[in-house]
Image: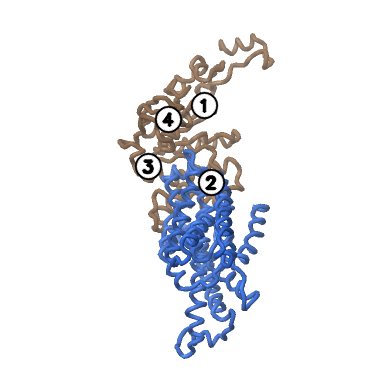
Amino acid sequence: MAGTATPSARRAALQRRAGLQVGRPLLFLGGGLALLVVIGFLTLMFGAINLTASEVWSGLTSDSDVFARNVVWQIRYPRFVDGILVGASLAVAGAMLQGVTRNPLADPTILGITAASGLASATALVINPQIPQWGLAMSCIAGGLGGSLVLFFIAWRGVVSPVRLALSGVALSAFFGAAIVGLMSSSRTFLQTSLGFLAGGLYGSEWTEFHAMLPYVIPGLIAALLFAGRLNVLQLGDDVAAGLGVLTDRTRLAILAVCGVLTAAAVSAAGMVSFVGLVCPHLARFSIGADHRWLIPLSALYGALLVTAADLIARLVIAPSEIPMGIITAGIGAPFLLYLVKYR
Amino acid sequence: MKLTVHDLTLGYDATPVVNGVSLEIDAGEMVAIIGPNGSGKSTLLRGMARLHRPISGQVLLGENDIHRMPSRAVARTLAILPQSPSAGLDLSVRELVWRGRYPHQGVLQRATAKDFDAVEWAMDASDVTRFADRPIGHLSGGERQRAWIALALAQQPQVLLLDEPTSFLDIHHQVEVMHLLRRLNHDGMTVVAVLHDLVLTARFADRVIAMRDGRVQFDGPPHEVFEPRGLEQVFGAPMMVIEDPITGLPVPLPRPAPELCGFAPEREANVASG
């Protein structure tokens, strides 16, 4: 049979055997997108005041029901897309960090990048409590980039070892976290919102958050995709990667910077959401394997799913009041981390 | 393609490990680098593959300094298999070998027919096709080493550098790996390997470079380099050389210390004189 196959059929067979067929990743991407649409519709329906499906539909598509239109377009829909950006950013940052450190426990929270962004955000709010959202986002970016650079240079000694990177991250995370709490406890005005900020959540998130995040998230996600091939090779160890033509330290620095930007963008809108960057890349890896060209987009989708679903739950458990969304992601993420530590 | 090492000094911090080494390795040679632990042989090999930035001197691939060439361009001509590479244990052999196409692929480019052919050839040449879909972590030592060699072959290099490709393998798998390297060399690939096993070196290398204290002590075909006096100088241990009854090639061995091996001194004298 092999002898009679045409070259293109033979190549297709090889392609199938190579595990490079796009079917499985596309299946997960498609299924995830469908689920995201469902979560989106539920997000539009349920909240402090529940709307029926037909009210949501008329709010979405017509001006007849002004109340429904406002709830849908001004409150719930922007909050939903904020959740997508936050989740995608954190999950992609986590996927890249796990790849670049070759450490399955790496994520923006554990490596201190979330805390560095949060410290910058808290500092900006202390200096100017009326700071516009785009300004807050910019200071978060500065903090996130600064945190990544500090992480890189502390971990540097000729070459950057994954172990040193992870240990430095733990120390930085504790340090920045303590600084945030110190800053917040010394400022009276914060006590109201600081709890939500520390746990992470999308309380009151609107279009301004979306517009402030977008200029960082879109380039960040594109950069992540462009680094996918290099991440695939870095997995094999520094010497092998260098032998294959990757400039390992320069690439690691660039990847950390992208992670800093993505994490900071998420923190600017949602505070210090934890565990999204840890859990989602693992779920994506369970789904489709370790090829970063698929792992990065699928992590982004899983991150969006986790954050939007967690936000929906957070708004519903004690409706009409709500709990910080980060409590839900931590409630899922912390046991998952323990599972990884014990069994992987 | 010719590989030229010119007055190369390599080291960690300021302490030189390789000290002013000059070498020329012509296209199609099969070269072994030997020497005691800490003699700088691995460092020299890594320096030849631009994994180590020189303190002074240069390495030329063809006409070009490898540190001035784009790193991916070097990787399309020269492949290195570092010592006992780890990690990536969740990958199948096939996924591992595909990573070897990295220097040939553009950032957003899809795999081409050339990529498929190169991967297929690399897996066939190193005889890993049978277990191509098994995870690397589940392979035996010999299979795993061949899978890593297949990764290097997928680069389609003209020069292949290997750092101790046979360590931790049993004798059967050692010979298997050396046969593979010999075949690749026969088909025109330049092969340079750091080897610990002197018997395998004598059997398979056309040229032996013996290093000591960061310098090249001897450089020549096995029958020239493998004579007792020279080996004793290199390794600082009493050596003897017997003749392989089948190939006539030298077989270097440590000279027995009679009081520790339970040999009578007169038998030792017989071997040395015979």
Q: Which mark is residue A138?
A: none
Which tag is nearer the camera, tag 2 or tag 1?
Answer: 2
Q: Which residue is mark 1?
A: B38
Does residue B197 sit above or below A42 in this rendering? above
Label 2 amino acid? Leu
Q: How many residues crowd mark 3 within 10 Å: few (<14), some (14–19), many (20+)?
A: many
Marks 4 and 2 share the same chain: no
Which tag is nearer the camera, tag 4 or tag 1?
Answer: 4
- Image coordinates of residue A245 in percent, x first then y, are 41, 45
Colour of chain B, in one word, is: brown
Q: Residue furthest bottom?
A: A64
Distance from Cα at disc 2 to Cα at disc 3? 29 Å
Which tag is nearer the camera, tag 2 or tag 3?
Answer: 2
Say if residue A213 shows up in the picture.
Answer: no
Secondary element type, mark 2: helix
Distance from Cα at disc 2 to Cα at disc 1? 28 Å
Distance from Cα at disc 3 to Cα at disc 1? 27 Å
Which residue lies at the image location 63% right of the left edge and 14% below the top edge?
A: B257
Which tag is nearer the camera, tag 4 or tag 2?
Answer: 2
Say if residue B68 shows up in the picture.
Answer: yes
Give me the chain letter of mark 4. B
Which tag is nearer the camera, tag 3 or tag 1?
Answer: 1
Q: How many marks?
A: 4
Colour of chain A, in one word, is: blue
Label 4 amino acid? Leu
Give me the chain letter of mark 1. B
Which residue lies at the image location 39% right of the left edge and 50% below the top edge?
A: B104
Q: Which residue is mark 2?
A: A165
- Image coordinates of residue B207 in percent, x first then y, are 43, 26
Distance from Cα at disc 4 to Cα at disc 2? 26 Å
Q: Which residue is mark 3?
A: B74
